[in-house]
Image: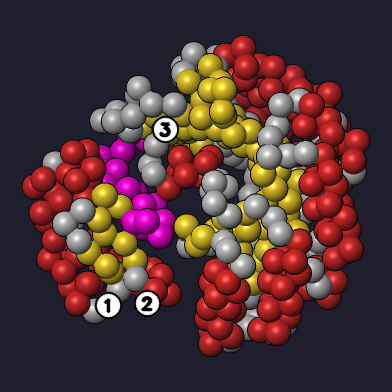
């Protein structure tokens, strides 16, 4: 099944290098491997040139990590951008983003990204409280986070986003309220406000199992989420996805590709691609990625052709993250009326329980449903039979 072959795609590029790994991070990242940067950039360029999706129109590009601002622009970012532009057809209005760490942010570096064609920056601030930042293992201070934001504004990016994390160790509701107040005072175009998750295999996971990680209570975590919605709504931000808020016209178009279950290409260690109903995942280890690209011209570690049921499940799981919800007629067009008809009893049950808002045209999570999203999804998948 290949429902989006004529549509523009999103492109993700993974930059795995960091000055230090955060204890909560389970992404494909490494610290102390800077000697690999030039070889890694060359390998990514080779993967781009060999892409089966070449010449496709591109709606968005996202350089994530890791820490794209940790590497040299001319050594790593610029050659990859050149390879992308030679391989794909960028739309004139393409959103081109990079992630930035306040600890590796300065005016010259931001100007270089801006001159290199990037029009959006997402700054990993996480908190405006130095105590919280230390517990998160971050290398920057609150003052440096504010400075990084102002530098980005001065560089002239069309859209500036910041990331914040709630539910941090020993974080109070008042501390989170302070983070929200500072964010609103700064006035970014977009705010990603994630709840901390404890991922297997991370230092935080080991600390949590041993009882050494004092996380907020479930009630406090719920209060933080409710405060986020209320404070940002009052400040004029649209709550458009479960963890994302934007001023008008500033939704993250790249992430919308994922949530709308559209096609995307992915390049670099641990990067995923989805095209024609097939998902591929690259080697997570940057060293192994470089080795395989050099020896084989491919670093794909996993590939799967998704079934109709898997595709429908993903479309539901991703689409319901959006506050706009999912178009039922579009689901019927993609997956057939019979498959959608099987969902109707579960949709009615969840609507009766106040967890979904259902109309003939759309289905979306209610406020209560957002708080219990995992339960909603489990019930929907079970209802598929």
Q: Which residue is mark 3?
A: 263
Percent of width and height locating residue 328: 21, 50
Mark 3 Cα shell of 10 Å, populated few (<14), some (14-19), many (≥20): many
Q: Which residue is mark 2?
A: 368
Which numbered disc, 1 or 2, marks the residue that appears first in the sequence? 1
Q: Nearer the viewer, mark 2 or mark 3?
A: 2
User: Which of the 4 image quadrants contains residue 131?
Assistant: bottom right
Task: Report the Cα–Cα distance between label 1 and label 3.
Answer: 33 Å
Q: Secondary structure at mark 2?
A: helix
Examine the structure image and report whether residue 176 is included in the region drawn in magenta.
no
Q: Secondary structure at mark 3?
A: loop
Task: Report the Cα–Cα distance between label 1 and label 2.
Answer: 7 Å
- The stretch in magenta equals 303-325
Q: Find out whether the residues at labels 1 and 2 contact each other: C-beta distance under 8 Å.
A: yes
Mark 1 Cα shell of 10 Å, populated few (<14), some (14-19), many (≥20): some
User: Which of the 4 image quadrants contains residue 335?
Assistant: top left
Residue plotted at (35% across, 24% down): 5
Task: Report the Cα–Cα distance between label 2 and label 3.
Answer: 31 Å
Which numbered disc, 1 or 3, marks the residue that appears first in the sequence? 3
Q: Nearer the viewer, residue 128 or 335?
A: 128
């Amino acid at each position: 099944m290949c429902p989006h072959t004529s549509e523009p795609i999103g492109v993700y590029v993974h930059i795995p290098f960091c000055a230090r790994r955060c204890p909560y991070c389970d992404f494909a990242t490494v610290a102390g491997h800077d000697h690999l940067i030039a070889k890694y950039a060359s390998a990514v360029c080779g993967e781009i040139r060999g892409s089966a999706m070449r010449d496709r129109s591109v709606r968005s590009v996202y350089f994530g990590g890791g820490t794209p601002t940790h590497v040299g622009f001319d050594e790593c970012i610029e050659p990859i951008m050149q390879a992308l532009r030679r391989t794909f057809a960028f739309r004139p209005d393409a959103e081109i983003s990079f992630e930035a760490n306040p600890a590796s942010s300065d005016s010259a570096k931001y100007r270089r990204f801006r001159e290199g064609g990037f029009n959006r920056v997402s700054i990993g601030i996480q908190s405006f409280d130095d105590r919280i930042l230390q517990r998160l293992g971050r290398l920057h201070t609150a003052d440096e986070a504010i400075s990084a934001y102002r530098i980005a504004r001065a560089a002239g990016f069309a859209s500036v986003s910041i990331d914040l994390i709630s539910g941090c160790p020993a974080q109070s509701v008042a501390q989170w309220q302070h983070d929200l107040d500072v964010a609103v005072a700064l006035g970014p175009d977009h705010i990603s406000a994630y709840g901390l998750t404890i991922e297997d295999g991370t230092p935080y996971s080991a600390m949590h199992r041993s009882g050494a990680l004092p996380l907020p209570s479930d009630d406090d975590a719920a209060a933080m989420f409710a405060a986020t919605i209320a404070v940002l709504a009052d400040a004029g931000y649209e709550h458009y996805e479960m963890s994302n808020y934007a001023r008008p016209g500033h939704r993250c178009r790249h992430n919308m590709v994922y949530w709308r279950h559209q096609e995307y290409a992915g390049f670099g260690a641990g990067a995923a691609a989805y095209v024609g109903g097939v998902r591929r995942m690259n080697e997570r280890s940057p060293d192994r990625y470089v080795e395989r690209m050099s020896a084989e011209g491919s670093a794909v570690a996993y590939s799967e052709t998704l079934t109709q049921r898997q595709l429908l499940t993903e479309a539901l799981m991703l689409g319901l993250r959006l506050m706009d919800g999912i178009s039922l007629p579009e689901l019927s067009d993609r997956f057939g009326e019979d498959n959608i008809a099987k969902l109707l009893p579960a949709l009615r049950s969840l609507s009766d329980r106040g967890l979904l808002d259902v109309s003939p045209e759309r289905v979306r999570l209610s406020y209560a449903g957002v708080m219990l999203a995992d339960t909603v999804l489990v019930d929907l998948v079970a209802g598929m039979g």
